[in-house]
Image (cartoon, rainbow, N blue to C red):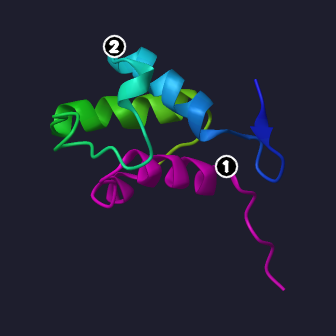
Amino acid sequence: MTTTPATGALTFEEFAAKVADGLRLETTDLRPETTLDGDLGLDSFDLVEVLALVGELGADLPDEVAVELHTMADVHRAYEAALRPPVPDA
């Protein structure tokens, strides 16, 4: 398993494989441009499951972030952002 050096985050391909496994989808169904509702047909209950899967990968996403997630790239970016260490106050 490879990670993004700055954050320790999984690459998109590894992330997509984990999400696909959790949602019982084919990994090939998940590309960065794949839409959660249109392409995958995910509803709000499925999105909660996606957030739980991201949480299992070590990144807790607040509920308000969920409304901003439209594609797999959005989910992966939110996951990476949640793993970044906080910037200390100057």
Q: Secondary structure at mark 2?
A: loop
Residue at 53% x, 54% y: name it. 77
| In this view, 45 is above or below 78 | above
Q: Is residue 10 magenta?
A: no
Residue type, label 2: Arg
Amino acid carrying label 1: it is: Leu
The residue nearer to you, when weighing 90 against 29, is 29
Nearer to us of marks 1 and 2 is 2
Q: Quadrant of the N terminus?
A: top right
Question: On the image, which quarter does residue 89 sit in?
Answer: bottom right
Kindly indicate whether the residue at mark 2 contacts the one at mark 1 (C-beta within 8 angstroms).
no
* Mark 1, other Cα within 10 Å: few <14 / some 14–19 / many ≥20: some
Magenta-highlighted residues: 62-90
- Circle 1 sits in a helix, a strand or a loop, which is it? helix
Front-lying residue, 9 or 85: 9
Q: Residue at x 45, y 26 (%)?
A: 19
Q: Which quarter of the rendering shows the C terminus?
A: bottom right
Badge 2 crowding class, 10 Å Cα cut-off, few under 14, some 14 to 19, many 20 or more, is: few
Circle 2 sits on which residue?
24
Which is more N-terminal, label 2 or label 1?
2
Question: Picture coordinates of residue 16 (x, y %)?
Answer: 50, 31
Q: Nearer the viewer, residue 46 or 39?
A: 39
> Which label belongs to residue 73?
none
Q: Is 22 placed above or below 38 here?
A: above
Q: Residue furthest bottom?
A: 90
Using the numbered discs, state the Cα–Cα distance from disc 1 to disc 2 in whole angstroms: 25 Å
Q: Is residue 72 magenta?
A: yes
89 relative position to 14: left or right: right
Image coords of residue 12 (percent x, y) = 58, 40
Q: Which residue is mark 1?
A: 83
Q: Position of residue 87 (x, y in %)?
A: 76, 71
Q: Position of residue 15 (x, y in %)?
A: 56, 32
